[in-house]
Image: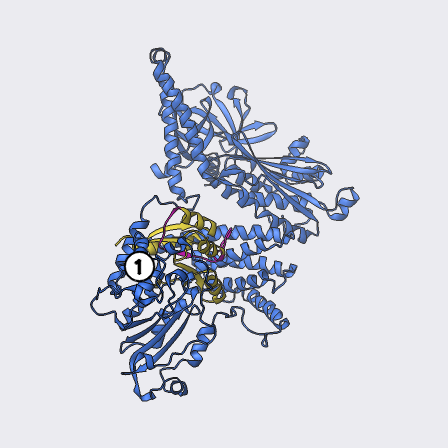
Amino acid sequence: MSDLDDFKATYFDECSELLTELEEQFAAIEAGERDADRLNAVFRAIHSIKGGAGAFGFQALVGFAHAYETLLDYVRDGRIELVDDVVVLCIRANDIVADHVKAAQTGEPLPADYGMEEKERFDALARGERAGSDDEDEGGEPLDEFDIEFVPVMVNLDAEAPATTSDDAVEDTFDAPPMQVEPGHWEIRFTPHRALYARANDPLLLFRELAVLGEMHVRALVEEIPPLADFEPFAVYCSWEITLVSPTLTEEMIREVFEFVEGDCDIAIAQLGAGVPLDAAPIVAAPVAPVARAVAKEPEPADLLALADDEVASLLDFDTGPVAFAAEPEPAPVSVQDSFEEPPALSFAELAETIQPSPVAKPPAAVTPLKAATPAAAASEGEESSGGGRSVGVQSIRVDLDKVDRVVNMVGELVITQSMLTQQMDETLRARYTELVRGLEVLAQTTRGLQDSVMAIRAQPVKSVFSRMPRLVRELATKTNKKIKLETIGENTEIDKTVIEQLSDPLTHMVRNSADHGIESPEKRLARGKPETGTIRLSAEQAGGNILIIVEDDGGGINRERVLQVARDKGVVAPDVNPTDEQIDQLIFAPGFSTASEVSDLSGRGVGMDVVLSNIKKIGGSVHVRSWTGKGTRMTLRLPLTLAVLDVMLVKVGGSPYVVPLSSIVETIQCSRASFERVPSGGQVLQVRGEYVQVIDLAQRFEMVTDTDADNRFVVLCEAEGSAKVALIVDDIIGQQQVVIKSLEENFERVEGIAGGTILGDGNVALIVDVQGLKTTIVHKNAA
Amino acid sequence: MTTLRVLTVDDSRTILAMLHHTLSNAGFEVLQAEDGKQGLDVLKNETVDVVITDINMPVMDGIEFIKNVRATGNHQSLPILILTTETSQDKRDQGKAAGGTGWIVKPFDPEKLISVIHRVVH
């Protein structure tokens, strides 16, 4: 994987988090929480998405995100009012951004005009805003033009500084006639303001950079330097005149060097005639700001220490004459004292001493070859700073899921080894090696702790799924003309990442079902003496080794008569069977079941709650529904904390151990008590409470030889996808335990009817029976 | 030459990762923070040669961060580069007003990034 791919992966990861955050923020914004923090968070999210997209060249995404970001910027500073229409537009825009991200990720481009309509609406909003403001005469300005405020010096220079061409300005400014202008011979007058230092810009660095451009001579103007007693460390006393000679030099190249200090200094750049002395050239100083002189404060001793940095460097580097930077070093020290009009409060020697230990202390040489001096300075500074441990301000690390899974697997192995060891300790050994037994007990405890900790790494708060629901409920309420309030509880409850990923669809379906079928219309609710606004409560909590996710509504409850009627019509329930209320409630999970009188475009998408059940079963969970007529319905999802460990029933078939996931087992029956019936095709069915269930003899299916007497065998009644039952015949039931799932595909190859393998405490391998897979293959065989 | 240390402050992991890659390839030691507050915390315990910071960040934005850096400790002469986009001239100006030394335009070109750093670092 290339670096770029790595970055992209990080980026898309980040995008998905940001999109979730957008969803959350807009849920609150729509609920009326339109404070600055939220708007800022929204702006940042889009800004970050755009930033990364720019880096990878996702132009369509950049374009849209940019327009949207600009709108948000306007909203944020109040230029556009965040009315409901704008909120709706933003929510739509979030979707479009998400689609663009997805398109960038999959590489499947969206139509060129995708999102154009919304983009135009952004523009229209901005135009509306602009038309209303006084200082704009044009309405149709594109959104992405920002006001440029930071230009005064530059503008003035452009107006007055002589250009390289011989126009009037040149004649006005220079005594020398235009024809004397020598290409490549430049003069720069540089007078920093105090701000330059306050922003850590350093003249020395500018000179260093200029020196690269051509042959440079620098003259420091030091007349302004006060006696040391009055010297203010961050004040500006020096200015410099620089000549720079290079045939290829242009004004832009020089300006680029000063890019960061524009506005923080007076700077004049002029192309000079050959031989014209520096002093003679009038300096074009920017007239905008008067040269900033520091307002003198009483210098404190501490301030003197602070001199150590660029100020001292500036002080020490000046000379009275032009300095050839390209020339050899002339290390003749200059007496700084001479430059002061009054005796300084501190002698230079004292000052030098004060600054010696400083990282940037330079030899008090008047002239220092810049190229040589700077690496040394940098080096000494580097040494100074390299001590100490490296601390990073980030509180979490991101780890590839594969790596975590590897740890999970190894901990699984450890658990197995540990239980194997414990099992092999028979009574004699226990009596003989008490120390060893104690050690094993500690090992068992530590292993369990380790296992819990590792599982916790994979856990994530259910928030990421819950956060999608407010919007869903809003949309549903609007479409059904109902008033619905959503409450969420326990959204920080953590579940295994894989379970979370699989949870989204079923939960969406359940909430949709509650909004669509559960909550009544406002009129009906009022008539029933309930509050006009219905409530859907979404909660998550941990209960033992399970996570319970509960979707509750205060609607009308399940209409049992209708459910039973439909179930009978569809043949789900035999005419002579009278199910209990609770059984009727569970019928809504039967395959193809839908009670909506007319197919609404919300819930009635051709799939019913059976999809919920099968999805939840897939992740080892179960669903239970309870309903109170006229009062509401509660659907409870019971999910495993993790998918890596499975609760199973250990069975024996043909002398080999097999395991059946406990979550799919309905009941077990002794064969001697079961009523089997032959069907004409030669197969067997089992009658369980008036229901005929397909029988699969595992020994037969897995081609094992069994010597167990038929009557002593057992039926394990399992529920496959969509509540369809299947009866597995096994030789013996050994017990119940937890196992760590091992992939068969990774270690061997895919075997039909087997979901994976596991290693038992005694070291034996047991295969995990794939109930759903078995049922499907049998059906196929019959079909063929 | 001793390794120069750069503190990068950005709430976007993508940008942090790309900065880290570019800078460490160029021989810098890179410290990271995800917002201004974290950035300040890092500076409390660490000495760095240059700071690169985003503007739009949660908790403490880049402008506040720069102001705080300039106001505390001996960071008056610590070069701070602002990460901006082409169009955000106003951000650039705000950053400068707060005490930013220079800026880097996103998306950045790695060579340009390094040369800009060398422009402001001793």
- Give the residue number, with chain letter if any, for mark 1: A348
Q: Chain of mark 1?
A: A
Name the residue located 76 percent from the left edge and 46 percent from the top edge: A524
Amino acid type of the residue that numbered disc 1 sits on in the rendered structure: Phe
Name the magenta segment's main secondary structure.
loop
Residue A511 placement (x, y as % from top left): 62, 44
Residue A250 within the segment the image draws in magenta:
no
Name the residue located 76 percent from the left edge and 42 percent from the top edge: A530
Name the residue located 45 percent from the left edge and 35 percent from the top edge: A455
Residue closest to the eye, A139 or A297: A297
Residue A553 appears left or right of A377: right
Q: Is residue A14 above or below residue A498?
A: below
Chain letter tied to blue: A
Residue A701 placement (x, y as % from top left): 42, 31
What tint does the image give chain B? yellow
Where is residue A759, by image quadrant?
top left
Q: Is residue A662 visible?
A: yes
Q: Is residue A44 above or below residue A150?
A: above
Image quarter where the C terminus of chain A lies is: top left
* Residues rendered magenta in the picture: B45-63
